[in-house]
Image: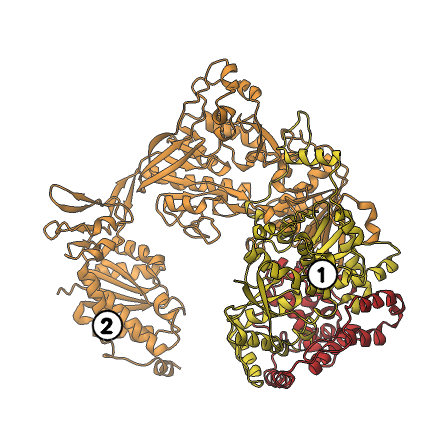
Chain colours: A red, B orange, C yellow
């Protein structure tokens, strides 16, 4: 949910966001292209795109955009929408997020070791051998906590998150619902 | 209470009024319900402001012997003059005609037709009641002083000055810098013809300097303004040049001998040097140098005085101080121009942090053959020629983080720069733009010419200018800048290696624009540019009568537009001067000396300094020439001793009575019924 | 009397960010600051939760704000040392202040856990801001007993301290000088680091090594180019990315970089005369020992370096015939740290 109007309609397609984005190289579409596609009603292209998942939330686009559009918020909303519709592109990022979030739901805190382990085993097996020395280093230097920390108010947190889900589902409000037109899919 | 014969005219204004207000019902109501207030005829008409509409009024005045006219239509701002003149043509004093607004105040702001119709009736009743208390008035005639003050000696100001002076009238140009010429004097070539700016400007500067009717007050500022149209009193401060102008020959020896060199942030835009005593450029008008005490060794330490020692005519005078002059003028033209946007405000472009990022003004001076590099395009080290130059559009324009507006000239300026770089060097030139705005005469043709010359255009707003190399393949670019931009047409991000980056900075109002506007009694918009009276129909007049504006002080514009502005303002001013007198609205406050108790509450309230106190008679007096009829003193006087002609207590109370009167009677039909009847 | 703040450590503090934890514990008491850890705080969601569901992530963060409001004890300031935690907390507070509807929804969710949050009742600030604004550079300077002269540091603030800046506290969002100045006041030699606020890539190192490793490479290369012995950071994510993944990056690009990255509190502790091992030194993968060797001994400046320093300190006089064009001065407000 974005409190302020995202002002996507005011985008003049100048390309400052795309030009600023540090992770641009891996994106299917530049942020600017995503906005153009949203306005063209190309829902599928947008939700199947890996662009929002490659956003690092560095806010360079946000402070440079001449129309002051809340770009990272739009990216978050797109990620959420894609997740809700189960349209996550075949990319690693959504799975990483999901794993991260699962730990929060279990423990109330993130569990770095578990996250990294699960993630690499699933997606980056080939990197593991090269990371052994560093990995061992982390252990010997006391930077790996092998046991997850449980918060005490877990029940309360679960209730809060469940209630938030209820509210969200009740008030479905997409950032960019376009009337189905133009067939630009 | 008198009941003068009154005519009521209800305008449809097409559908603007008629679609919401039942104009026929209102007409009939006025004819019947206001008959006892003097209404003898009531009409409705599609467009009262048309010639035919006006003729209705004129004919009725003659036929019915009307003594008052009430027109219910648009706002008085629009057509009060029209209807007053119509009445006047038919022999009725124009100030016995009232225009009441049933458009801006009724049909444009309400949607409930029945209520709107009722309100229209009330508004008309107010008008009729008031107008019966109105008395005939005559406009105040004030003489117009034939002298004109022009603030700002740039191209707009010079143009206007020459026009007015050639017509035979005196002009004073007050210019803050040591020479007239403005920003145009700093440019190298001007688009789209690539004329050398100085070549086309200096003849006009020379004319202005030599014209018998033009008095130049350079190195001067206006410090006080009082009076009103036709009769302004201006106080001008002449800052000390420390040079005796009458004796100075302009030989320049003092400048040569001065040992102090400082960065010239004025004419050379911070990319060159000047001495503590200097003329800004060789063709300066007037030719007299100025000395800036904050840079002068003598003023700092009491020593040196090289200029004095070497001056062959002994015209250096360290004892000079500010001098003040009083001018009397009839009209004022503000032509104070602009300042360039400070590009240091945009961190991403690195101006101020990265040496080889330049602004447009810096580049103009660099490219200028009379500039600090003799016209050589070089990097900040003063020596190296760039092999790759990137020109960045929209720096400080079209950007909610800095200025939202488009600065109008930067696209053309950028194209010009591309041409100049190619002319002076072998460099590759890139231009990064969002849109290409080339609307003027010959402008798009110029764009095509630049395309032809081989400049590469990248459609994308530059995201970043950096000295940080990133990718391994950039290893050969050590020491160069990288311009990072999304090429939106190709859909790829590009990092363009550049030796020099030129930022096309936008135009902003002068730093003291709001203070200057306040001093002259004109308004500024929120971004600091002066507001014109009407953006389309009165683009060089302001809401203050007698004060005009021309050139970039009104907003970003190119040279042809500034010149047109100057000429247009001159034409209006000349018409005023030619008429020799000006008719001012007769709405003035007057003091009833019998009633004035001498409490002086009103004395300090007048925003136009029109109120004085007669110590002998112990009563307040109001100067009708300065009074603008604002009504503050009328409202403030506890003894009811001040009344306004054209807005007396009686008139205002009458209008209130009318507005509050019961409009329910008469042949009222509701709008829906009316529609039904005609359907 | 110690100044007290509420403290939100974040999930990395007792894991990958341990050195930060050690140095904070050592340094803050020296500045007479007491950090009261929020009781039973939960994860802020990093950048991951917002991607699943914005409202839930606001509620997740909201629980922490609600706890802070409850546990306020003479202070309403919640300090976060990790930039991502800081942004999440600051954003949720800013958004619920801005939107009544969002505030109502978040409080509705919180009520299911018996909690609530009054928008604006907690002030969220980053640890660096506390140092610059509350403690002040002069005060920090007073505590320096072993100036870090000779140690060339690249101040890397990372992207989330001066951006998005919901409360307009930063004038310079891309090149703020706050960290530069802090390190200068520790006596260190601070290099002009052009990538002060360029992103370390966040989770990209895990998700997409092509992107992530290149992003850290650019930071490291720029630090080397500027002549730095070490990078200094304010965020455990940045530290981990540049530190833990440096070897893999070297491998991928067939290069051999060795740029240690340290937390600013570690450098503060060193300058305050505390032993390195108490400050988490030794926990870094890319060893800081070579860098520290530069100041292990109080090395006197060479004659050339002396002359260079003296020349730099003298006001410049333009030589006749010097073709160099003058350059613009910094703006008056650019002197400001932020």
Q: Which mark is residue C278?
A: 1
Residue C321 image-quadrant placement: top right
Is B135 situated above or below B517?
A: below
Q: Is residue B252 left or right of residue A142?
A: left
Q: Is residue B491 left or right of residue B278?
A: right
> Label 2 is found on which chain of the structure?
B
- Residue extending farthest to the top is B312
Viewer-closest of C175 and B579: C175
Q: Is residue C107 left or right of residue B172?
A: right
- Measure how far apart labels 1 and 2 are at the Cα level: 84 Å
Q: Is residue C57 left or right of residue A25?
A: left
Query: Label 2 crowding class (10 Å Cα cut-off): few <14, some 14-19, many 20+?
Result: some
Is B23 situated above or below C149?
A: below
Viewer-closest of B135 and B460: B460
Does residue A13 appear in this view?
no
Q: Which residue is mark 2?
A: B660
Does residue A142 appear in this view?
yes
């Amino acid at each position: 949910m974005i409190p302020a109007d995202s002002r996507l309609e005011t985008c003049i397609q100048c390309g400052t966001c795309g030009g600023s984005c540090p992770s641009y190289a891996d994106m299917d579409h530049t942020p600017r292209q995503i906005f153009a596609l949203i306005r063209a009603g190309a829902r599928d292209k947008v939700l199947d795109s890996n662009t929002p998942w490659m956003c690092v939330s560095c806010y360079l686009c946000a402070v440079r955009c001449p129309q002051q559009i809340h770009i990272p918020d739009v990216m978050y909303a797109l990620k959420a929408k894609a997740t809700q519709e189960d349209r996550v592109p075949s990319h690693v990022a959504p799975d990483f997020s999901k794993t991260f979030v699962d730990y929060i739901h279990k423990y109330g805190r993130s569990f770095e070791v578990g996250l990294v382990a699960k993630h690499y085993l699933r997606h980056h097996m080939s990197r593991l051998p090269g990371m052994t020395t560093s990995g061992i280093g982390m252990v010997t230097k006391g930077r790996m906590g092998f046991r997850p920390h449980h918060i005490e108010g877990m029940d309360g947190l679960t209730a809060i998150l469940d209630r938030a889900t209820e509210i969200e589902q009740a008030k479905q409000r997409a950032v960019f619902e376009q009337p189905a037109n133009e067939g630009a899919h | 209470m008198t009941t003068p014969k009154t005519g009521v005219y209800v305008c449809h204004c097409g559908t603007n009024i008629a679609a919401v207000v039942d104009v026929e019902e209102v007409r009939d109501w006025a004819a019947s319900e206001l008959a006892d207030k003097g209404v003898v005829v009531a009409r409705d008409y599609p467009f009262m402001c048309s010639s035919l509409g006006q003729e209705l009024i004129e004919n009725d005045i003659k036929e019915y012997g009307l003594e008052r006219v009430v027109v219910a239509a648009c706002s008085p701002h629009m057509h009060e003059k029209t209807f007053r003149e119509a009445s006047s043509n038919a022999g009725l004093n124009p100030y016995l005609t009232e225009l009441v607004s049933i458009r801006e105040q009724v049909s444009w702001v309400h949607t409930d037709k029945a209520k709107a119709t009722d309100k229209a009736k009330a508004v008309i009743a107010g008008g009729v009641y008031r107008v019966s208390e109105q008395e005939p008035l005559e406009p105040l005639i004030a003489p117009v002083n034939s002298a004109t003050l022009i603030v700002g000696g740039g191209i707009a100001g010079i143009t206007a000055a020459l026009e007015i002076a050639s017509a035979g009238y005196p002009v004073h140009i007050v210019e803050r810098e040591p020479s007239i010429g403005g920003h145009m004097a700093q440019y190298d070539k001007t688009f789209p013809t690539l004329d050398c700016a100085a070549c086309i400007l200096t003849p006009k500067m020379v004319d202005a300097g030599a014209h018998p009717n033009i008095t130049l007050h350079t190195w001067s500022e206006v410090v006080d303004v009082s009076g009103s149209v036709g009769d302004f009193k201006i106080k001008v401060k002449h800052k000390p040049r420390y040079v005796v102008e009458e004796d100075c020959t302009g030989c320049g020896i003092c400048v040569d001998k001065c040992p102090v060199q400082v960065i010239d942030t004025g004419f050379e835009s911070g990319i060159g040097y000047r001495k503590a005593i200097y003329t800004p450029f060789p063709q300066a008008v007037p030719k007299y140098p100025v000395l800036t005490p904050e840079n002068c060794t003598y003023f700092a330490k009491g020593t040196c005085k090289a200029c004095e020692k070497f001056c062959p005519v002994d015209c250096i005078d360290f004892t000079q101080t500010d001098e003040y002059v009083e001018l009397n003028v009839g009209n004022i033209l503000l032509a104070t121009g602009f300042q360039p946007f400070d590009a240091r405000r945009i961190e991403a472009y690195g101006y101020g942090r990265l040496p080889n990022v330049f602004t447009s003004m810096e580049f103009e001076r660099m490219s200028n053959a009379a500039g600090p590099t003799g016209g050589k395009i070089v990097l900040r080290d003063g020596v190296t020629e760039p092999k790759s130059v990137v020109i960045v559009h929209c720096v400080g324009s079209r950007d909610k983080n800095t200025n939202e507006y488009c600065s109008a000239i930067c696209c053309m300026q950028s194209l010009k720069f591309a041409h100049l770089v190619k002319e002076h060097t072998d460099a590759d030139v890139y231009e990064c733009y969002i849109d290409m705005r080339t609307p003027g005469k010959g402008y798009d043709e110029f764009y095509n010419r630049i395309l032809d010359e081989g400049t590469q255009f990248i459609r994308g707003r530059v995201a970043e200018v950096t000295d940080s190399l990133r990718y391994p393949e950039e290893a050969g670019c050590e020491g160069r800048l990288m311009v990072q931009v999304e090429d939106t047409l190709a859909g790829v991000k590009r990092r363009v290696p550049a030796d020099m980056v030129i930022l096309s900075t936008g135009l902003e109002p002068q730093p003291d624009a709001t203070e200057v506007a306040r001093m002259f009694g004109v308004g500024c918009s929120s971004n600091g540019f002066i507001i014109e009276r009407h953006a389309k129909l009165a683009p060089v007049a302001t809401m203050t009568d007698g004060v005009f504006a021309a050139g970039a002080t009104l907003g970003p514009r190119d040279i042809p537009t500034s010149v047109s502005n100057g000429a247009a303002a001159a034409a209006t001013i000349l018409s005023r001067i030619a008429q020799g007198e000006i008719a001012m609205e007769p709405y003035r406050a007057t003091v009833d000396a019998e009633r004035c108790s001498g409490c002086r509450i009103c004395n300090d309230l007048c925003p136009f300094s029109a109120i004085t106190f007669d110590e002998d008679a112990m009563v307040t007096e109001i100067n009708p020439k300065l009074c603008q009829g604002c009504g503050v003193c009328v409202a403030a006087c506890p003894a009811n001793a001040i009344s306004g002609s054209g807005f007396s207590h009686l008139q205002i109370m009458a209008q209130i009575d009318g507005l509050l009167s019961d409009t329910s009677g008469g042949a009222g039909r509701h709008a829906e019924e009316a529609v039904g009847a005609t359907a | 009397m110690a100044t007290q703040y509420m403290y939100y450590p974040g999930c990395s503090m007792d894991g990958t960010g341990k050195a930060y934890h050690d140095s904070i514990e050592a340094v803050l008491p020296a500045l007479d600051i007491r950090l009261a850890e929020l009781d039973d705080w939960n994860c802020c969601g990093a950048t991951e939760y917002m991607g699943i569901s914005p409202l839930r992530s606001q509620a997740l963060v909201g629980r922490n704000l609600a706890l802070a409001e409850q546990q306020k004890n003479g202070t309403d300031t919640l300090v976060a040392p990790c930039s991502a935690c800081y942004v999440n907390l600051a954003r949720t507070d800013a958004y619920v202040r801005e939107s009544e509807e969002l505030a109502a929804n978040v409080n509705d969710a919180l009520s299911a856990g018996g909690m609530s949050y009054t928008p604006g009742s907690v002030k969220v600030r980053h640890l660096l801001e506390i140092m610059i604004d509350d403690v002040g550079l002069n005060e920090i300077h007073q505590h320096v007993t072993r100036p870090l002269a000779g140690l060339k540091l690249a101040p890397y603030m990372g992207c989330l301290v001066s951006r998005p800046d919901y409360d307009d506290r930063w004038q310079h969002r891309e090149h703020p000088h706050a960290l530069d100045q802090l390190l200068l006041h520790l006596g260190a030699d601070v290099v002009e680091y052009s990538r002060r606020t360029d992103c370390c890539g966040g989770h990209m190192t895990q998700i997409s090594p092509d992107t992530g490793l290149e992003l850290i490479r650019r930071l490291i290369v720029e630090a080397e180019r500027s002549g730095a012995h070490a990078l200094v950071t304010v965020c455990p994510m940045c530290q981990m990315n540049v530190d833990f993944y440096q070897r893999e990056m070297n491998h991928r690009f067939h290069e051999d970089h060795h740029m240690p990255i340290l937390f600013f509190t570690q450098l503060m502790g060193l300058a305050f005369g505390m032993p390195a091992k108490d400050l988490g030194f030794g926990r870094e993968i890319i060893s800081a020992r070579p860098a520290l060797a530069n100041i292990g001994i109080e090395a006197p400046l060479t004659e050339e370096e002396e002359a260079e320093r003296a020349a730099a300190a003298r006001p410049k006089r333009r030589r006749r015939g010097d073709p160099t064009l003058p350059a613009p001065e910094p703006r008056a407000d650019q002197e400001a740290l932020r």
